[in-house]
Amino acid sequence: MNKHQYDVIVIGAGGAGLSAVAAIPKGLKVAVLSKLFPFRSHTGAAQGGISAALGNIEEDNPLWHAYDTVKGSDYLGDQDAIVQMCNDAPDAIFDLERKGLPFSRLENGKISQRPFGGHTKHWGESPVRRACHSADRTGHMILHTLYQQALRRDTNFFDEFQVVEIITKENSCYGVVAVKLSTGERHIFHSKSVILATGGYGRCFKVTSNALSLTGDGMAICYQKGIPLQDMEFVQFHPTGLHPLGILITEGARGEGGILINSDGERFMERYAPSIKDLAPRDIVSRSIYEEIKAGRGIGGKDFVYLDLTHLGRKLLDKKLPDVTGFARTYLNIEPSSEPIPVKPTTHYAMGGIPTDIDGRVVADSEGNVMSGLFACGECACVSVHGANRLGTNSLLDLVVFGKRAGQSASLHADSMKMTELPSDSGDESESLLQNIRSNTRGPKVYETRNKMQEIMMDYCSVFRNKKGMEKCVSLLAELKDDFKKITISDKSNFYNYEMMAAFELSCMLDVSEATLHGAMLREESRGAHSREDYPDRDDSNWLKHTLCYKKENGNPKFDFKSVNLGKFEVKERVY
Amino acid sequence: MLRIFRIQRFHPEKNPKSWIDEYTLDVDENDKILDVLLKIRDEIDTTLGFRSSCAHGVCGSDGMMIDGINKLACQTFVGDIPGKKPINIAPLKGVPVEKDLIVEMDPLLDKVKSVNPWVVAKEHKAGEKELLMSPEDFEKIEDMTKCIWCSCCTTSCPSLWSDSDYLGPQALVMAARFILDSRNEEAEKIIDKVGGHDGVFRCHTIGNCTDACPRDIDVTGAIAAVKKVILQGIENNDSNGSIIWENDEKEK
């Protein structure tokens, strides 16, 4: 096995990983591993904007931003982390700008801002222009700008390396094991600090805006080593996925004035969120769309509604929303300046993930004990700033702010210690998993099991959930996990073996699906993106707390709980 | 409907030469070529090598030659190749192939890196939080900033096919983007890198690159803009690439 030694290694090279890289002092030896090429990462698909209370167009205040984020999270977000993020936001934007990010501009040369769902002024009074953007390709610009700056620093990249295991012993992390895709060789990356920035797991569901690569790898390799996953029942369904493909149409389209209409031509969000209407947070809009569909007011009685941009005019669409209108033209052959766009909710974002503190340190239990040397940031982490529902634009902000903080604390950690010896059993677990996959001869194929998993998660664990459906899903998922033990691949080579990689990704997806489903079963209330038909109300006396899901070798996962950091904003009923 | 897909294969450990495999699949005209490739790899031949990720045209992983033209497989539909003729799928041309539709990225990336594709920010003026940039200055670079590094342009360029030292359209679009960025302190350094023997003046305005770009970037125009900066000086550059391109046409 090939061995490497670094002070800090970063797993994943999207916005979070590259923000961490930018924060690591030059004296430290750093390597970045990605299963893709860094500039293919899914940060690049983020569209509408990144929020900061710059007040470039109208009065704004970081505390209003924090209030909106707390309320948007349905009070499950940790308020200390949220205040930190919103206070850090303006400097994070200026930092990106100085790194070369080409933001759209106002006439006076300052960064342009636009309204976004759930972002308001004066504590919820009316929408505010807070989302800094570069047309509707803000994530692309963040990803490329950070990568360009990483090149400028001559960063050491290991592209197309799939990380399959984190090396841990007791409460410390020693590095990772990765497989080089082009050769199948296993490499040990031995390091003082490991930063996980591996993104989400939208591909566990049949309809998603997520890239094929978003399979929950970082979360699953932690879960495998006994680290709990936090708040996994909270999965965001973005209201406006292109029907039927699930490709994202940014909320910025509604920020610019687009409206949702049902089969009667009614702007139905006026009924569900009278004060901010179509700019209500995503959980509310997604549920409202399904309520309309259930009431028979989907377009043509079917399972989608229309996003109407026709009144905005071709000029505005070309200038402010060129990419998403392009998607409608390319994928549905629809001209958005003259026809409405069919949309329905699409699996979009994981609010839950690897528990961390405000400095990116992975917290391994409900007592606050950290896993020494292990850090996480971005979508794979749960700080938690998004609680039960994330506001649009806050994911990009999260990954820049907490990516930087994770990079800083991982550097301090690496600086403070000498390299310790690798545990003798390093890499044994992943070796046996991959060996089993390779040696199985009669069993289901990867795509068969994967497709079944995606279907049951979509059917029973998406926007609306109930006990009966989820019980069925639990037993079906257990069957699929059994099937996985026999999973059989026909490509036995070591040369760009995508089938082996897909099998590994499937094992990750089955694990994170398990955590999501069992968390959703356990939480007998409705909060944010988690809507139980059998428990329609929020239940603060029993459930204003985080869940921690631990893997068990056999049988269902085990749960523990952690309190929510409150105190800055009063917990109230959430109405818009 | 049944369509035939003829895919160029290459596994150097099995066969030193490439070959063609033919697959007949029941497809819809609205299926993406990427859907077809994924189906083949899932269900028929799991050894088929190709890259993919976002599946909707923003990550740039799946550039390949489809029916003779460089395209992204996730943005190309079966129905885009009309009739019943077989649909030919081959790797991008002009760079070494590693396996099937996977090409070596290093030669492409090395060229991009060689032009210093980054901003070195100018000093802030007192009282300014962001570096101010007029909407007009933003518009000068906006088109080029859309680039997703898919390499469809560079691998369609006949000048590059005949001389692999030429920097090629992808690196030159990045050069243009950073030369024309009003905030960049080190634009001159980039100008020095692309003004020489293997740089912008190797471009013969054939325009394959612009046709191939899945992001609709005026690639040839961007290269022309750099030529103009080199000939006239950066301070005299007052228009974006596409307008300069029209002027260049007139000058001919």
Image (spheres, rainbow, N blue to C red):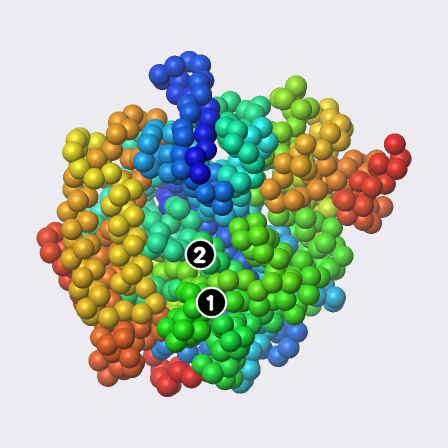
Q: Reply above or below: B95 against A30.
A: above
Q: Are marks 2 and 1 on the same chain?
A: yes
Residue beneath the point at 74% across and 66% down = A107
- In three-dimensional space, the C-alpha distance between marks 2 and 1, rounded to whole angstroms, equals 14 Å
For mark 2, does the 10 Å Cα neighbourhood hold few (<14), some (14 to 19), or many (20 or more) residues? some
Element at label 2: loop
Amino acid under disc 2: Pro
The relative height of residue A434 versus residue B160 in the rendered view (above or below) is below
Would you identify the image quadrant in which residue A182 lies?
A: top left
Q: Is residue A340 left or right of residue A240?
A: right
In the image, A56: left or right of A180?
Answer: right
Q: Can you identify the residue that label 2 sits on?
A: A244
Residue at the limit of the structure toward the right, as seen here: B251
Rate crowding at label 1 as few (under 14), some (14 to 19) or many (20 or more) other CA atoms within 10 Å: few
Residue name at image x 36 percent, y 17 percent: B13
Residue A58 visible within the image = yes
Q: Position of residue A29 (x, y in %)?
A: 41, 40
Instruction: Please give the label number shown on residue B59.
Output: none
Q: Position of residue B206 (x, y in %)?
A: 73, 29
Q: Nearer the viewer, mark 2 or mark 1?
A: 1
Query: Which residue type does callout 1 highlight?
Result: Gly
Q: Nearer the viewer, residue A387 or A515?
A: A515
Q: Residue at x 61, y 45 (%)?
A: B215
- Quarter of image, res A435: top left
Asked whether residue A137 is in view, the answer is no
For the point 65% across and 62% down, the residue is A337
Q: Vertical placement of A39 versus B104: above or below? A: below
Chain letter of mark 2 equals A
The picture places residue B9, in percent across and down from the top left corner, at 43, 23
